Image (spheres, rainbow, N blue to C red):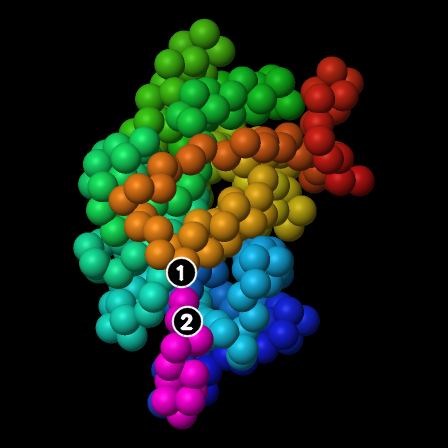
Amino acid sequence: MHFDRLKRREFITLLGGALTWPLASRAQQRDRMRRIGVLMPAAADDAEYQTRNAVFLQGLQELGWTVGRNLEIAHRWATGDPNKLRQYATELVALAPDVIFTSVAATLEQTRTVPTVFVNVVDPVSMGYVASLARPGGNATGFTLFEFSLSGKWPELLKQIAPGATRIGVLRNPSIASMGQIGAIQAVAPMLGVELTPIDARGIDEIEQGITSFARQPNGGLIVVASQLAGNRKTIIALASQHRLPTIYPFSYYVRDGGLISYGPSSTEQYRRAAGYVDRILKGEKPADLPVQHPTKYELVINLKTAKTLGLEVPPALLARADEVIE
């Protein structure tokens, strides 16, 4: 076992593994070296998460933190496995780092003492991780996934690109609080003339079973809500293609991997902003005093190749609104 002491380029290709804090480093640089534990839901070789982590590390470097000089980072990569998420969350807490950085709710459930900065958490207040957005009051703070009203855009956009869809499956992980998202979707469904069907899935087997079962009836479409299913996104995209289900996703990287359309927050912006919160905590500020923030940048991305495969013609007005079009 070893500890990451990598420059940015090496960091991007990090494959992770079971890491521990090196005793020699602690003895030699006790006053200078700070430690961060990082838990991510995807595999270590996931290109999207490599990019996110590179942005996070670059942000830290710009604030004066350099891996191997005054900073150590221990990574855990859960590869979309709920059991690994819980296991690795426990491991990182046991390492007692100065700060934990995560996009995984399981980490927040493991400790009420280790300072924690989170990103992409759906509803930290209702999940009990913070007392309020303005005054978190505990050991955790960070960045929400988005404001729930955004979720109401998903069925609207899906109907614009696939007007024939009258049945919409809503794929979610029931272990993650998503009622705000579901409520916003339900509010607009009657106006669009669509019937909603919940598809609950925690892992790859339930994803396959749920989507396959839903696709047995015609005129279907799919909404993938933000609920920590990103580690299985290639399976979701493949199933949507196999069953010819027009699908809208919460993040742009689904579309870059072959999905049809997405609308959601920038996948890297929160990682850059999170570096600033980690820096402030390492310099003595408390998570309890740092307000939880919403994303500030949203993206509409469309994959024309996938639309053509599904026999869909994207309306010109929708194309004109897109931040990115993949051809």
Tell me if 133 is positioned left or right of 65 in this view: left
The amino acid at mark 2 is Arg
- Name the foreground residue: 167 vs 188: 188
Q: Which residue is mark 2?
A: 34
Vertical placement of 320 versus 265: above or below? above
- Residue 206, which numbered label? none
- Name the foreground residue: 297 vs 242: 297
Query: Around disc 2, counting alpha carbons within 10 Å, would you say few (fewer than 14), some (14 to 19), or many (20 or more)?
Result: many
Q: Secondary structure beneath disc 1?
A: helix
Look at the image and give the residue range highlighted in magenta: 24-36
Tell me if 93 is positioned left or right of 210 in this view: left
Choose the circle earlier in sequence order: 2 or 1. Answer: 2
> Residue at left 38%, top 49%?
118
The amino acid at mark 1 is Leu
| Residue 309 placement: quadrant | top right
Q: Which residue is mark 1?
A: 282
Residue 53 in picture, x, y percent from top left: 55, 60
Residue 80 in picture, x, y percent from top left: 42, 60
> Residue at left 37%, top 28%?
181
Residue 275 in picture, x, y percent from top left: 50, 53
